[in-house]
Amino acid sequence: MSEQAFSPAERAAVYRAIAERRDMRHFSGGSVAPELLARLLEAAHQAPSVGLMQPWRFVRITSAELRAAIHSLVEEERVRTAEALGERGDEFMRLKVEGIRDCAELLVVALMDDRERHVFGRRTLPEMDLASLACAIQNLWLAARAEGLGLGWVSLFDPRALGELLGLPAGAKAQAVLCLGPVSAFYAEPMLQRDGWATPRPLRELLFENRWGETQ
């Protein structure tokens, strides 16, 4: 064991947060204390970032009118997604895919504008800005779980329409609507697994050695 390792209890807590993190859709109202919200956002802001560009931008939605408008955008895309799914459309429409109206806090996460000037680490992989943003959301997710709060990532929306609604500058792009807040209980397993939509694949099917498709 490395001398730099956390204590057994600390390591167990980290792995527990990872294992019990859930994409939550059911919220119980309530509120998130300002100091707790600040702590969670600071955890997100400590995410790894290619070239230290920190491409994430958080927009906290406190307007009831804006919350309702975002919900409408998501509902529009939910219907379009059902149509695109064809024979699984009706099954999809029965799923609960967001908790926008019920969550205590609503956040929109966007990629910054003027990203083209950041070349370090992105010359051949420009999408690393999105990877960095995803790391920030994962930090927030794990910290929220450790604090006993649920978080759900909603991606059913037209980013251009949401960007116009929130006044994003040219070049910026909305990537996530995050529902955050108290929950009555965390799902024992991923909701889409519980509801029969999909079955997670085991790691052994996704781990190769040396060449694609080759296993040990």
Image (cartoon, rainbow, N blue to C red):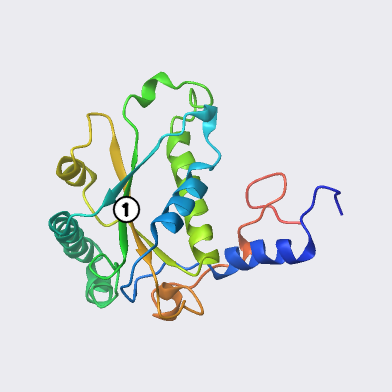
Under circle 1, the secondary element is: strand
Can residue 179 be seen in the rendering of this structure? yes
Q: Residues within 10 Å of mark 1 (few under 14, many from 20)?
A: some
Of 167 and 214, the residue lying toward us? 167
Can residue 204 be seen in the rendering of this structure? no
Residue pictured at 52% horizontal, 22% vertical:
120
Quadrant position of residue 114:
top left
Residue pictured at 42% horizontal, 75% vertical:
191
Q: Circle 1 is placed at which residue position?
A: 107
Quadrant position of residue 33:
bottom left
On screen, residue 138 above or below 117: below
On screen, residue 92 above or below 129: below
Residue pictured at 47% horizontal, 54% vertical:
40
Q: Is 130 left, or right, of 26 in this rendering?
A: right
Q: Position of residue 170 (x, y in %)?
A: 22, 29
Q: Position of residue 208 (x, y in %)?
A: 67, 52
Q: Position of residue 60 (x, y in %)?
A: 29, 50
Q: Position of residue 50 (x, y in %)?
A: 53, 32
